[in-house]
Every structure is written in structure tokens, then in C-alpha cells.
Amino acid sequence: MDDMLQNRDAEIKRRFQLWLKPSVLKLAEDWYEKDNCKSKSEFIEKAIQFYSGYLAAGHSQNYFPRVLTSTLRAIVAESESRVRRMLFKLAVELAMTMNVAAAAHHIDPERLPELRKTCVDALIRTNGSYTLEDAYRFQNP
């Protein structure tokens, strides 16, 4: 397979007539630069290689890694976006909770660093699984 790739890169290109529907030619015109191709011919050549790899899926070691990588990147990007949105919503709820707690209880500002350290220690000890019951037991020994 590697020999085939090296031979393909060393090949001299040949000009031939190609008949395309105007709508397909428009696709090549619209997309070749977005795919970092220098010409529509390069884009069409890559498209033929890609489709050939797709058809010969069992024999093409170059097709699957690109498709797999592209697919996995899209999945990870969507997942990251979803997690980011959920973390933001959680941060909003936490900020609201902290404001309610601060308004309801007068907490000495000098005790805040000590409270933060206690909370960090508790979260480390429980591997991030700290519940309201844990806080209640801590506050009411």
C-alpha cells in the first residue's frame, strides 16, 4: 500500500476532458479553496481518491483513519459544547445559591479561606461526591 502511495505521488498528471453537470462543477468551485486545494482539479482528484477508498473500504487503510478522525473530532466537539453549556448553567445555579446563603447568614470574611480549604479537603476525600447530607453532618456534628 505504501509503494502505491509513493508511486501515486510520483505520477505525472495527464490532462483529459471531463464532463460535469453545472451544479456539480459549482460544488467544486465553492469547496476547493475551503479544502485547502490549489485548484478544482486537485479537489476533484481528492474526491475521487476519497470515494474510491469508501468503495474499497475493506482494502483502504488511508480512508478509515481520516474518516474516523474527522468523525471523532466532531463527536468530541459536540460533547465539549454540551458540557460547557451544562457547566455554565450549573455555575449560574451555584452563584444564585451562594448569594442566597450570603444574604441569609452573616459569615465572618476572615473565615472564608478556612471554609474554602475545608470544602476542598472534603471534596478530595469524597472524590467530588459531596452531598447535602455530608454538609449537614459537618455543620451539625
Image (tube, rainbow, N blue to C red):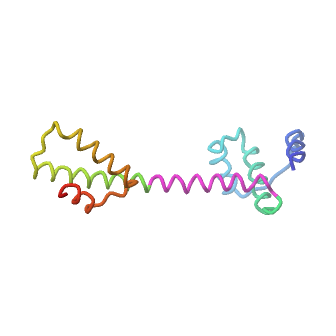
Point 40% across, 54% down: residue: 127
Expressed as whole percent of the image width and height from the top left, the position of residue 103 reads 11, 50
Q: Is residue 116 magenta?
A: no
Task: Give the quarter of the image for residue 133.
Answer: bottom left
Residue that protrudes farthest toward the top in the picture: 110
Q: How many marks?
A: 0
Q: Is residue 75 left or right of residue 88?
A: right
Point 75% across, 55% down: residue: 63
Q: Is residue 35 left or right of residue 99?
A: right
Q: Is residue 22 left or right of residue 48?
A: left
Q: Depth check: 65 or 10 in front?
A: 65
Expressed as whole percent of the image width and height from the top left, the position of residue 134 reads 27, 59
Q: Depth check: 61 or 117 in front?
A: 117
Expressed as whole percent of the image width and height from the top left, the position of residue 39 reads 72, 41
Quadrant for the C terminus in the image: bottom left
Q: Depth check: 42 or 4 in front?
A: 4
- Judge whether 57 appears above or below 81 on screen: below
Q: Is residue 106 left or right of residue 63?
A: left
Point 32% across, 55% down: residue: 89
Expressed as whole percent of the image width and height from the top left, the position of residue 30 reads 62, 48
> Start and end of the magenta stretch?
60-81
- Judge whether 108 appears above or below 73 on screen: above
Q: Give the main secondary structure, helix, strand or loop, of the magenta stretch.
A: helix
- Judge whether 3 appears above or below 110 on screen: below
